[in-house]
Image (cartoon, grey):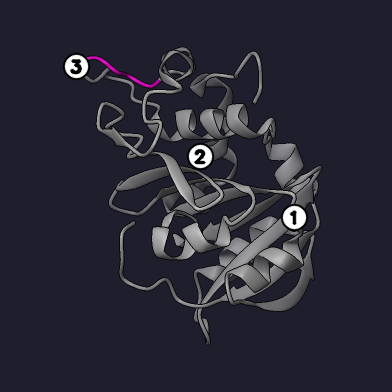
Amino acid sequence: MSTVPKTAADYTWFSKEFPLLAEAYCFTLVRDVSPDDLINRLGGRREGTTDDITAFVDHSYGPTLDGDFGAMAALGPWTLLIEPNGYLGVNEERAMPASAGTCWVSHFVNVNRVGAFLWAEDEEARLRFDPMFPNHRWGSTPDALLETMRHIGFHLGDEKPENCLSRQAAFALAGHLTGVSLSARLLMETTYTLASLPHSQPGRV
């Protein structure tokens, strides 16, 4: 884990630099699992590579054939999975088995602003909550990160602030848990392995 976590304010660039992706997305980081291994764990199929994340996002919102699309990249010991308008990363029916033997950190938002954050270790959900409603948490260690969450910018009181940065706070919390600090430059300059993924099945998001 990062010792001095960034805060929600450090991720305000996301919606500015990636406005289409910011409408609905799922970001997942998986430790010591290669992109190809992650594709296999999710039952997907490799579809080549790209170094243009913006074009990939645009394509993902168009017609697809056999399922959803994901872009994966190795960032040190972690693999990043970006799902435009997807949620496999926080779907426990899919994520829990795929987290076997590793650490899995994922956060999701859809077009209706419904969100989810999932921290799992070896098929055990340690923390689960909607970033918009951080007072309602569950998992095996739901209160393990309370001080960090306050520092990052999650509002844990009774009243919601006028300027709610819950999405940005989810990025910061994922960075704290993984040590992976995402930036607009990193996302734009990374080469990704592309995969078609089975459609997310109905279940606990």
Which kind of residue does numbered mark 3 sit on?
Glu
Mark 1: secondary structure: strand
Magenta span: predominant SS is loop
Which kind of residue does numbered mark 2 sit on?
Ser
Residue 10 percent coordinates (x, y): 58, 22
Is 157 in the magenta?
yes
* Cα separation between marks 3 and 1: 38 Å
Quarter holding the C terminus is bottom left
Q: Nearer the viewer, residue 167 or 158?
A: 158
Mark 3: secondary structure: loop
Q: Residue at x 50, y 53 (%)?
A: 123
Residue 89 visible within the image: yes
Instruction: Answer whether labels 3 and 2 touch (C-beta < 8 Å).
Output: no
Earlier sequence position, callout 3 versus callout 2: 2
Residue 129 percent coordinates (x, y): 34, 38
Residue 147 percent coordinates (x, y): 44, 13
Q: Is residue 47 above or below residue 72?
A: below
**Residue under label 3:** 159
* Cα separation between marks 2 and 1: 21 Å
**Residue under label 2:** 15
Q: Residue at x 48, y 53 (%)?
A: 25
Which kind of residue does numbered mark 1 sit on?
Ala
**Residue under label 1:** 73
Q: Which residues are magenta?
A: 154-158
Quarter holding the N terminus is top right
Q: Is residue 41 above or below residue 113?
A: below
